[in-house]
Amino acid sequence: MTEAVDQNRIMATLAKTAAERYGDDIAATFLRHGTWESLTFGEVWSRVSELARGLIDLGIGVGDRVAILANTRVEFTIVDLAVNAAGGIAVPVYPSNSPDECEWVVGDSGATVVVCENTGQVAKIAEVRKGLPAVEHIVVIDGPVDDTLGIDELAERGRARDESELDDRAAQVSLDDPCLIIYTSGTTGRPKGVVLTNRGFAAGRKSAADMQLMVKGASVYLYLPLAHVFGQLVQAAAMEVGATIAYWGGDPNSIVAELGQVHPDFLPSVPRIFEKVYAVATGMIPPERAEAAKAAVELGVKVREARVRGDDVSEAEQAAFDAADQEMFALVRGIFGGSMRLAISGAAPINPEVLRFFYAAGVPVMEGWGMTETTGIGTVNLPEAHKFGSIGRSVAGAEIRIAPDGEIELKGDLLLKEYWQNPEATAEVMTADGYLRTGDLGSIDEDGYVSITGRKKDIIITAGGKNLTPANLEGDLRRSRWISQVVMFGDRRPYPVAIVTLDIDEVVPWATAKGYPTDLESLATNDELIAMIQTELDAVNARYARVEQIKKFKILDRDFTLESGELTPSLKLKRNVVYERCADQFAGLYE
């Protein structure tokens, strides 16, 4: 392989290469004061180049880390690409993270520069600055903010340096060098830094291009957090093929309205958005029309799959389909802007019924699967090759097998390099022959479609695609004198909830002193005790990002025991047993 080819595959040259290929084509559209503005690929590269040289002026060297603490917006992309262009490694930080969580990510990564979105994000870093001795500079996007460097000032410093410096930096970067470190929650302890390489992103970009997930000139609506690997891959793939990224305005309640404004061709999303639209669309169907609507969806799937295969359908079926399309399906397409060619749902499972509905309506929502450790992609369904209920077939650059215990294992260029400064965790997740242990249990059918049947570990993935580690928050809550056990729940749900059991040795004396009944059934509904536990929960929640916080809880009128089968002999919680036995209580917390 020639050096020239390698240089086109590294992230350091992505923005420059895109500018050379696509020049005056629109790279980005974004809202400013209620108006959609745009930047060409050439303009994006110009800004990336200035900031990259500015970072060099701040002292960023090859392999140095720069943290980015901001919401998804065009400036995030520009900073991200600039870090790579300077030869550095980008470290995205979730904008919802608490100061303590920001301190861990920034400190563990050894970032020397932190780029913050605004005053609020700067305040988080300022609060924990004493614990971040490596941080030398804070750059702010929306300024001015005291004791920071404005992003325009950084660009001005960059303009004073020669652009040839960026060619020198790119020449020092190889395919196997890291370009991104994303921190993701493990089963226990602090988040681990997943080190992703230029080779992995090159494979992901090529895979997305080969499958035509997005194409030149297509509009890609992006609301996914760029602190998440899925958003990062979409961003890189769009630059690769010359697609336009339409950045959301930042308000979750405006997503559907913005889809109608930008008319995207491609929508990468988590299940929650599709589930919301599905609920609204089906909720408008009168009860007496429910069976007819169900039949229309089945017919719609049949007709559209026949079209993909090139098969004919009968005149009667075509007429019925045309009627359903005019009456219902066209309205659904309109919700997504009317131009949707493909949507990918990832990060958490989605009900096949939802997928069939949208496919019938002409909005092919295809389920895919990937992990941070696989550069965000591993398998995907496509409109011309799909099985609803599966996560699709492995993409180019990914070899998948099922281990003897049923765990899905993956090998290929997409894999992480390592966990940052954590060789023990790296060794634990890799097999001797180079496969990644994914933690998911599954199967592969005779056509190569992969299905997930369960999770080996206890990580919760919310409907919004956020990975949560319940053990940390549960452990914090168990420190309360009133609480014996806490079980957090939220897989595929919009937010976490919890079941709480009481510490009898503490609550019974308290109840006696208060003159309250002391049986657990009465205590579980005692308003004063509920309020006390709510206060404890509020204090614990404050230490976590909003998306991780337990929104509701219910006190159980008994404790978990070894005898009941909910605890192991070493008194560890059997989470799946509790989930099964308390299914009604958990469901009630979402009503």
Image (cartoon, rainbow, N blue to C red):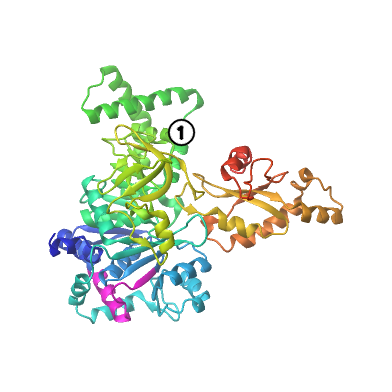
Q: Is residue 242 visible?
A: no
Q: Horizontal placement of 27 versus 492: left or right?
A: left
| Residue 119, horizontal then vertical, whole percent | 47, 72
Position in image of residue 427 (x %, y %)? 40, 58
Q: Nearer the viewer, residue 312 or 406?
A: 406
**Residue 295 lies in the magenta-colored region:** no
Q: Mark 1 falls on what kind of element?
A: helix
Whole-percent x and y of residue 438? 40, 49
* Left/right of residue 259 with respect to residue 15 in the rendered view: right
From the viewer's side, name the closer residue of 367 and 214.
367
In percent of width and height, residue 134 lies at 42, 78
Which span of residues is magenta-colored? 46-67
Q: Report the label total.
A: 1
Q: Nearer the viewer, residue 331 or 372?
A: 372
Vertical placement of 424 versus 58: above or below?
Answer: above
Q: Residue at x 59, y 45 (%)?
A: 574
Residue at 26% over, 26% down: 306
Q: Which residue is mark 1?
A: 282
Q: Counting other residues with Cα less than 10 Å from the Cα at mark 1, is it few (<14), some (14-19), or many (20 or more)?
A: some
Q: Which amino acid type is marked by label 1?
A: Thr
Above/below status of 387 relative to 503:
above
Q: Is residue 54 magenta?
A: yes
